Image: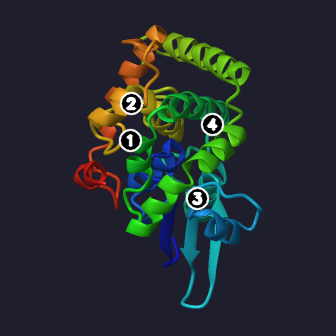
């Protein structure tokens, strides 16, 4: 790979950001992480992404001192990594590639439903949610978020399509995905595709991590996250093979804490 500096713009609580953070670590690509604060990130995200969207992650590539480029969206970042920095074992170009891509694409949609269910619960506990959101925020930003919370909540509920019917449909789709994953793992396989770790495993594990709460993640492992952010009555989540597999993936392959984040910093926010 040519000499390039990589900067990853993230949210501490985003499982889509974790998907790319983990991928970069496993590919051995050094990067600087810059956590952003929701709401206050919007102008910069639109400018960097150039697509009229405020979503993170965004990867900044500094080619030279005067030339930079940006890639927004986790799937687009994976495509850029494969095209510009590959090949990587994690991103196979062999006959496994189609299956890997299909699983990654499927669980990107599942990740949206995970977010809907997590936020449906989190919005009932705004002080706890804002503490996770503002782990890297300035004091005045934290105060602004508290003051503007009713408006912020309404905007996010609209963006995430969090009507009662929308949440019911999200839960149904998520249950279907977990049944599929339980079935995929029922033959005792360690990896979802082939006989080694691929981005299919990373994507699925990262995007389900808010439900599995692996010890290795500095946000999802927090006691307050487990108590206030998880759906309290979702018996269909408890102790199923899919979520045990997610925790196993983290234990075996996610030994380093996400750069720029520590459990202590999140807990102290």
Q: Residue 268: x percent and y percent? A: 25, 53
Where residue 98 appears, as percent x and y from the top left, is 67, 35
Chain-order first, disc 1 or disc 3: 3
Disc 1 target residue: 128
The secondary structure type at the circle numbered 1 is helix
Q: Residue 148's quadrant in the figure? A: bottom right
Residue highlighted by disc 2: 228
Q: Earlier in the sequence, mark 4 or mark 2?
A: 4
Location of residue 214 with respect to 261 vertically, above or below: above
Which x, y percent locates residue 202? 47, 39
Q: Is residue 5 left or right of residue 76?
A: left
Mark carried by residue 57: none
Q: Earlier in the sequence, mark 2 or mark 3?
A: 3
Q: Is residue 110 above or below residue 255?
A: above
The residue that label 3 is drawn on is: 39
69 left or right of 131? right
Q: Are marks 1 and 2 in contact (CB under 8 Å)?
A: yes
Furthest residue toward front: 147
Please tell me whether mark 1 or mark 4 is closer to you in this view: 1
Name the one closer to the observer, 166 or 20. 166
Instruction: State the separation of the CA atoms marked 1 and 2.
Output: 7 Å
Q: CA distance from mark 4 to mark 3?
A: 22 Å
Q: Residues within 10 Å of mark 4 (few under 14, many from 20)?
A: some
């Amino acid at each position: 790979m040519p000499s390039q500096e990589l900067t990853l713009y993230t949210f501490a609580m985003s499982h889509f950001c974790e998907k790319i953070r983990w991928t970069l670590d496993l590919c051995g690509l050094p990067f600087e992480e810059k956590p952003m604060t929701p709401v206050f990130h919007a102008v910069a995200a639109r400018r960097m992404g150039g697509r009229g969207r405020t979503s993170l992650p965004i990867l900044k590539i500094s080619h030279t001192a005067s030339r930079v480029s940006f890639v927004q969206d986790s799937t687009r970042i994976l495509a850029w990594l494969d095209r510009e920095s590959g090949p990587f074992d994690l991103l196979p170009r062999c006959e496994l590639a189609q299956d890997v891509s299909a699983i990654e694409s499927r669980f990107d949609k599942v990740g949206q439903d995970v977010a809907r269910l997590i936020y449906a619960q989190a919005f009932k506990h705004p002080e706890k949610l804002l503490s996770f959101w503002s782990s890297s925020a300035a004091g005045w930003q934290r105060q602004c978020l508290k003051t503007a919370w009713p408006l912020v909540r309404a905007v996010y509920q609209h963006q995430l399509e969090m009507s009662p019917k929308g949440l019911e449909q999200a839960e149904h789709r998520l249950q279907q995905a977990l049944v599929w994953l339980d079935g995929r793992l029922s033959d005792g396989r360690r990896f979802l595709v082939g006989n080694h770790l691929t981005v299919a495993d990373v994507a699925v594990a990262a995007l389900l991590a808010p439900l599995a709460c692996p010890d290795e993640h500095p946000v999802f492992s927090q006691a307050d996250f487990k108590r206030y952010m998880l759906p309290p009555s979702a018996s269909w989540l408890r102790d199923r093979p899919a979520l045990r597999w997610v925790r196993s993936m983290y234990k075996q392959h996610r030994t380093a804490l996400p750069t720029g984040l520590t459990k202590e910093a999140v807990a102290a926010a």
